[in-house]
Amino acid sequence: MRRFQRRHLKAAVISVGSFVLFGVVTGLIPNPVYVRMVPRTLLDYLFLALTAGFLGFYVLQRTTEQRGDEKTATAGAVLGFLAFGCPICNAFLLALFSSSALMTYLDPLRPLLGVVSVALFAGLLYVRSQRPCESCEVEPKQTATHQ
């Protein structure tokens, strides 16, 4: 039972922590250090909450056995970050493209990026929920047969 509570606590900390971290870094949570250049929208907050929630559920479902789902989870998190982040405040994107190109091409695609992120996470979590739980399975009793 203690392991069950620890997993839920870890998932909650990851979810709340990623919400606060991503919210502060993108300016969705107002702070004196970072000023967002693009207006905040309801969709930005929705994709922030969904991305943070999905990260928490991903951690909750994660087992000790590595399954190769990390790439899908990383892609979902990055696409989610691009969906709710300020396109012209991202120094990496600004170094690659001009601010006018980002506002012309990336800004209109942000809702689509958010939908793709949610679809990736939802698909990943669905597939993982269909797999058997190694810690939940009862080992079959072995019967001794004499030959």
Image: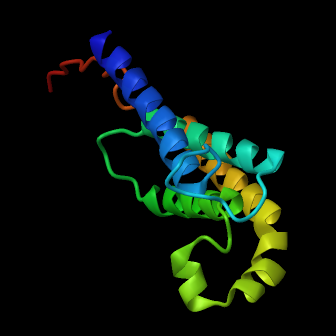
> Where is the C terminus found, in terms of image quarters?
top left
Visible in this render: residue 131? no
Residue found at x 47% / y 56%: 69
Here the colouring is rainbow
Visible in this render: residue 141? yes
Q: Is residue 106 left or right of residue 85?
A: right
Question: Residue 25: percent from the left, percent from the top?
Answer: 52, 55
Depth check: give the residue in front, 19 or 36: 36
Depth check: give the residue in front, 117 or 146: 117
Asked if 129 appears above or below 1 in the picture, the reply is below
Depth check: give the residue in front, 127 or 61: 61
What is the residue that sits farthest to the front in this orientation?
Answer: 32
Q: Quadrant of residue 113?
A: bottom right
Residue found at x 42% / y 30%: 13
> Where is the N terminus found, in terms of image quarters?
top left
Asked if 123 appears above or below 1 in the picture, the reply is below
Q: Quadrant of residue 77?
A: bottom right
In the rendered picture of this protein, how many numbered marks are placed on residues? 0
Asked if 91 appears above or below 62 in the picture, the reply is below
Question: Residue 118: percent from the left, percent from the top?
Answer: 70, 51
Question: Residue 103: percent from the left, percent from the top?
Answer: 78, 78
Q: Is residue 104 left or right of residue 30?
A: right
What is the residue that sits farthest to the left in this orientation?
Answer: 146
Residue found at x 57% / y 41%: 52
